[in-house]
Image (spheres, rainbow, N blue to C red):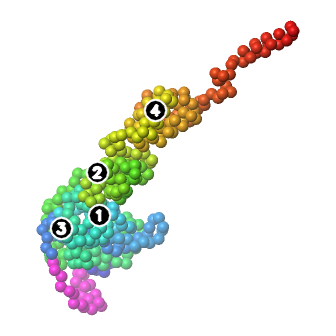
Amino acid sequence: MAIWQDLVDEHGYGEKYASVKRFVRKLRGSSTPEARVVIETAPGEEAQVDYGTGPMVRDAQTGKYRRTRLFVLTLGYSRKAVRLLVFRSSARVWAELHEKAFRRLGGVTRVVVLDNLREGVLTPDIYEPTLNPLYRDVLQHYGVTALPCRVQDPDRKGKVESGVGHAKRTPLKGQRFESLEDAQAYLDRWEERWADTRIHGTTKRQVAAMFAEERPALLPLPFEPFRYYQYGERAVHLDGCVEVEAAYYGAPPGWIGRRVQVQWNDTLVRLLNPTTGQLLREHLRQERGRHRIHDEDRPRRTPLSTQQLLHRAEKAGKHIGQLCQAMHAKHGELAVRRILGTLALAKKYGIASTDDACALALETSTREYHFVRRYLEHNPQLPLTLRQVDPLIRQLTLYRDLIESKTRQEDQS
């Protein structure tokens, strides 16, 4: 087929495909194929997905040719296929390729049959497989059910296996491309010119005509694409928080020392029960080093040491005490070090300057230690030392008058 198509496109060959096929058969010889079971599906019912080996494509970063991966999604009824090329695979790439294929088709099937590759299936099991959580959520967003094959049973997805082989033997065999975009454009042209217009060997009908019948039976696409996230597993530390990209997020009481599943993106962090998948807590993303804890997860009792620390802050200055109370009310026990830092600032810059800075923080509703520290760093007003003013040191004029009076008394004597 590949030879005949190249002869037609490049040399204007006018004979039929059968002529080239007869000629090649003489060179190749004959073999007896094994019988295959044909699985019939209703329109819009099933799609099959798989990876295959793609062509060599020059990598723009290294300047060298690299072997690509060929993703193929084939509809079970019409045999309409979507073929996409990528350099590398991951759980997110695998899910994104499904999404691109669904949008090219203009709809989704009710079932997707796949192999047990790691990007889609974490634990293979014919009765209760464990799907990759990101892949599972993408399919759920589109209303699709994943149906992994039995281990070492590729015949269950023979239609997509045939689609992978068709592309490898026909348009891509022996080809090299200078960019991934050029390779994809070449594959798309071949898909439209030859793959969609061919008469399928089993159905004896044109693929494009059968897809026109199947397309109305596809489920509609959702209004918005899936919002991708990263995921992992984290331990809940002694402060009741998990760490995600150097920020800290509170878990419910009772989870200290246990592990939870975590999902995060640029906006949210979600903590999930690793056994049931139940949502435990959802937090807005925080900056590095910051904490986010729900009010109901904070300890109800203030430890005695913290009470004593707050009392020291109140004695240091009115506004210092108010700011430290506000930090403790907002952050709980996480504010202890911030209170200590505020008291250290009072020792370094003086109580009066620190109290003024705390008053400004309260007035601007900032209520953060970093604000007070930066304000004092940019407006340094060091406390007066004993050499400048002190109640024990009298004014210099008094010493002058005393010396003059003593001097006069000695002169008179």
Q: Are marks 3 and 1 in contact (CB under 8 Å)?
A: no
Residue that badge 4 annotates: 311
* Mark 1 or 4, nearer chain start: 1
Which three-letter amino acid code belongs to the residue tagged 4? His
Q: Residue at x 21, y 87 (%)?
A: 33
Q: Is residue 173 magenta?
A: no
Asked where in the image residue 258 lies, by quadrant, the reply is bottom left
Quarter in which the N terminus is drawn: bottom left
Q: Are marks 1 and 4 in contact (CB under 8 Å)?
A: no
Residue 67 in the image: x percent, y percent? 40, 73
Front of the two marks 2 and 3 = 2
Which three-letter amino acid code belongs to the residue tagged 3? Glu
Residue that badge 2 annotates: 280
Q: Residue at x 26, y 66 (%)?
A: 130
- At mark 3, the secondary structure is strand
Answer yes or no: is residue 296 visible. yes
* Mark 3 or 4, nearer chain start: 3
Which three-letter amino acid code belongs to the residue tagged 2? Leu
Residue that badge 1 annotates: 132
